[in-house]
Amino acid sequence: MISVVIPSYNGAATLVPLCLSITDVLQRLGLEWEIIVVLDGSSDESRDLLASLIGEGIVDVLCELPIRSGQQRATLEGILRGRGSWFLTLDDDFGHRPGDVEKLLAVKEGGADLVFGVPETGRRSSLRNLGSSLRSTLFHLASGRKKLIPSSFRLFSRSCALSLFLAPVACRYLSVELVRHSRKAESLLLTAGGNAETETERKAETKNENAHSSAPGTSRHPASSLVRGTLSLASYLLPWRRDPLCSSKRALLVVGAGGGQLGLIRRAKERSLIVAVSDRDSSAPGVSAADYFLSADTFDGEQSIAACLDALWKGIPIRGVATAGTDQPVLTVSLVADHFLLPGALIPEIALAVTNKRVMKQRLEALGLPTLPWSLVGDKSASAADTGSVPTVLPGFPAVLKPVDSQGQRGVVRVESKEELYQRLPATLACSREAKAMVEAFYPADEVTFSGWVEEGRLVPLLLTDRATLSSGPHIGICPAHRYPSCHAALGQEVFELCDRFVRGFPIPSGPIYVQLLVGDEGIKINELACRIGGAYEELLIPALTGVDILDLQIDLAMKGSLSPQNHDALVRAGASWPPEGFASVILAFARKGVVRSIGELSKICAVEGVIGGGYLLAPGRRIGELENSTGRAAWAVVRGESAAQVNRSVEGAYDALEVIGDSGENLMQDLRSFALHPDPLPDSEVS
């Protein structure tokens, strides 16, 4: 697709015929395109005239700047909104002939990723020719490319386009930045004749010439515009041109600012990165830990892209994007990375498959991987909303009803009948953005989780843990603890082989994986899978047991698309010695209903022998409701030891130290320590 960007200031006389002419040309060439018009503070009737073209689908995007900002800024605004793999920019007044686009395309086919179309000087005003000559001289000095002639009539690749926003400069001049980041740039002198003009183009040019000749001195391109452009280009020769904040540092965008992102944020700061976080909640705990806050729903890719664009305009040098601990932002990360060509993220198609349970199930079944029978269910007005076959027969009861695009056990319930299913369906769909929910066969089984890292398509195993769960009424899968090693450790190789088939089949090129599996009488079933660091504080658990700093790996991947030699070596060692030795438990503590008056001292938890990290998740004044999902967690702690008995003593001590005091003065903590205790440990004296 070609994104055609037309900046315009009071261009009503020519905008409509120009858009029609461009459409004629690109349609004749059999190309896919979109037209983006940016009104640069226009005060004429341009907007009203374009309304009909928008309705007809000829103009795809209309962007209006509230005040006049100049051609450079207006063009950049249009490029920001482009979806094409190629971009075409041109003036709004037929100073560039649409018919010449074909000539630029021919040069592009010869291998150029940037082509300047240079109109012959006789067809333009003397003022514009003088400005072009002056700017060309400065351009040669700034770019070091004496044989190139710049022009605002440009065809360039998406990678060149995005360099405009990734270049750490306070003052941008489009042609210089494009040349600096192009592989092969060429200038093409456009003489009169050649391609036949369309009837629309001939009439429009005549109209434009008449408009200018009848109103001398009213040029829409005054001398001030020439001066501004020349000074902007000249600034490349000045040493103070670069932004002092962004000249040497790079920024990581962390999608989500909840507690699960704090470790990633802090580690990035330790690595001297600028950190921006995006979240719809400006009071989320990660906001105060980061350098910048971007207001955007972590589930909304378009909103997140728009927030990132705004950040780039403000000079925040975003070079990577990542998330940790939560499922749905993985897709948002993918969409942001795809838009800005940032490294390390999954492509959107794969990201959708690991975040949308409907697509996930279809892929698992296509690969012949063991999973549970399923179907989709919605009200009568809901459509299937899928591209593949979906089972239409319910899998039987009892069954599990779940959203296809949620996380943290939100909306997940066990149902015993068809009547109960439809009774609970509205509450489940309220946790989703889709019109249908998933119904899955209930499988009595133990839950285990597999954590690993994929490097260049090769899966390295890290941990296999028990995911201890409890039910609260119909709400199931609520997790108060993880334990290592798993009581199903003997199945480790079989689990690894299943996960390896998933990695190769989806396929997953690089990054973390986190797979939830069910182990029951019918063998191992893949429940759900994700491409993220686990949300049960695996960021502490994995380094403690394997020596692999999983957060460092995530940041490496996000910022440069590959691992540092040190992290690569640590990963190789972990794979060679899998499964790792040692014992551990992760306490995910919950509190009873009530209002929090105060919380205990964190130092008491951290002082317990074997505790390597912990914290409270509730603040005074917080109202605690019924236990329904993981959002009700009150506190956490990660415990490590050389034996199960050591870990169990630490779990006991940590639970004894936990305090969430309610209005009545009682400790609201639920005593769920049994879930974190390892079963039947040998006394320390019997451990060899």
Image (cartoon, grey):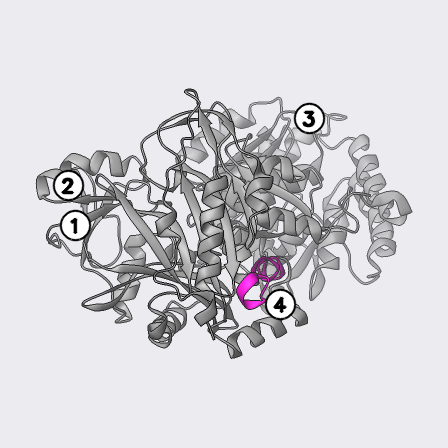
Q: Earlier in the sequence, mark 3 or mark 2?
A: 3
Magenta region, residue range: 544-558
Three-letter amino acid code at disc 3? Ser
**In the rendered structure, does residue 125 fall within the stretch colored magenta?**
no
Q: What whole-number distance in Å separates the C-alpha atoms at marks 3 and 1?
A: 77 Å
Residue position for label 1: 399
**In the rendered structure, does residue 555 fall within the stretch colored magenta?**
yes
Residue 586, x across and y down, in percent: 46, 53
Q: What whole-number distance in Å separates the C-alpha atoms at marks 2 and 4?
A: 47 Å
Dividing the picture into quadrants, the one containing residue 223 is top right
Residue 675, visible in the rendered structure: yes
Residue position for label 4: 563
Residue 476, x across and y down, in percent: 26, 46
Q: Residue at x 62, y 55 (%)?
A: 155
Circle number at residue 214: 3
Q: What whole-number distance in Å separates the C-alpha atoms at marks 4 and 1?
A: 42 Å
Three-letter amino acid code at disc 4? Leu
Circle number at residue 421: 2
